[in-house]
Image (cartoon, rainbow, N blue to C red):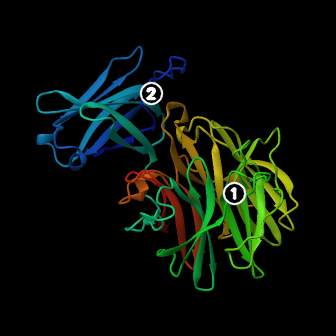
Amino acid sequence: MKKIFFFLSCASFIFLFSCSKISEEIVNPSENAKGGVTFTLLKSAIPPEVKVVSIKLERSGYPIVKDSVVLSTATDTVRMQVNNLIIGYWNLTVTAQDEFGIVKYTGFAYVQVLEGITTSVYIAMSPVGSGTGNLEIFIYWGLAKSKWTMYLNNPVLNQSPGGWDAEHFYVVDPTIVKVGSQYKMWYTSGNNSRQSIAYATSSNGINWTKHGIVIEKGPIESWFNNGVSDPTVIYEDGIYKMWFVGKHYENIHNGIGYATSIDGVNWTLPASPVISPSGTKPHLFGPCILKKEGIYFLYYTVGYSIYNREIFLMKSVNGTSWEDYGMVLKRREGLKWEEDGVFVPMVFYDEGKFKMYYSSMSDTRNSRITLYCGYTESNDGLTWINRPLYPELEAPHTKPWLTMSATYPYIIREGSKLRMWFSGLSTIPNQWQIGYAEQ
């Protein structure tokens, strides 16, 4: 099913929801604050029956703004610019018509224009159903040119046709350890109903050999009787140490466990989690372990609901008894790509500071979930600064691999180079897979 791709740049922030109409509860801004929007589309990416593309911006109490382009007279890169928009929310309608003026596709979103910030937003509109109908609009943030150079043959780890994981929706959330000349990866593999932790090895970090599942659900009486996920691993003194999430039939995120192994395959599992959920921390997931100067830093996610997640920190001298340092990162109000919280941190110490790559999510209220990856820094691992207003990684950055979400990275430094393995929701097939990039 072919997609229509749009790029947007604006003289302000633009926020887009998929298939939504804006509520009248939103406060109107000052009449003096304005911004502009430039819609850029690639003609070569549009289905051949589409001859005219039109945009319409609407807002209660303001004139309707329209523009259109006839594709037969346009170059491959086409721009439609709208200036002097009052900042705030505008309903957006995009239509694609054939040579007879019949609308073949119609998509809806809304745009929030904020004053004084320049950014870009990428929209991918996919036909839903068959024949003439609506469009499903995928919204991605950004987008200056990505800092990361994508591997051209992504994904580097995916489901094996006809194999044990062929029907798995998730091949996701990698954690990497390099021992000698060998890269070792543990990752989550499974479906929404159940996940396990799988293992793969590589001599170069790009070509991987899968070795199957190494940790799966425990017995019915165990605290992880419905699966495991979210591994984070370090290697020290000849022992692999893993912190992971246990899933229970009564709690999908039932605490963080600690396991050890001498070969990375056979693991000694705990009888109980080292960090358990509570009334104030109902769901615990997405741990990341870092050891610095003899202290273990464990960053992890507390989920209050699907609409609100925050990142917490605990410290330990032995990896099993933990001191709680509380919440260290939360969503920023007004940023659409962080609207449903921040979660699954990846933290490492590099160039004299702590660096965190974290995940965020938007649009869960509208049945379209898009995940992103943000970035921030810290001098002490507690207070986080230098946090850009746009994502570090999102779906458009992964091209030529076409994805709908890009997040859950794992990063290591080798000399002057940063190497990143990340999770992408591939468009075809519709499965989470693991990609690779460098900086």
Q: Secondary structure at mark 2?
A: loop
Q: Nearer the viewer, mark 2 or mark 1?
A: 1
Q: Report the side of 250 relative to 141 (left or right).
A: right
| Foreground pick, 22 / 403 | 403
Residue pushed farthest bottom?
180
Would you place residue 341 above or below residue 435 in this image?
A: above
Work out whether residue 381 can be spotted. Answer: no
Q: Which numbered circle lies on residue 217?
A: 1
Residue 340 showing in the rendered view: yes
Residue at image coords 56%, 43%: 361
**Residue at coordinates 16% horizontally, 47% vertically from top-left?**
75
Q: Which mark is residue 20?
A: 2
Q: Would you say 61 lies left or right of 432 here?
A: left
Q: Residue at x 71, y 55 (%)?
A: 245
Q: Is residue 316 above or below residue 224?
A: below
Q: Observer-nearest residue: 394 or 251? A: 251
Where does residue 371 sit, x and y in percent of width and height? 52, 47
Give the Cα distance between marks 2 and 1: 39 Å
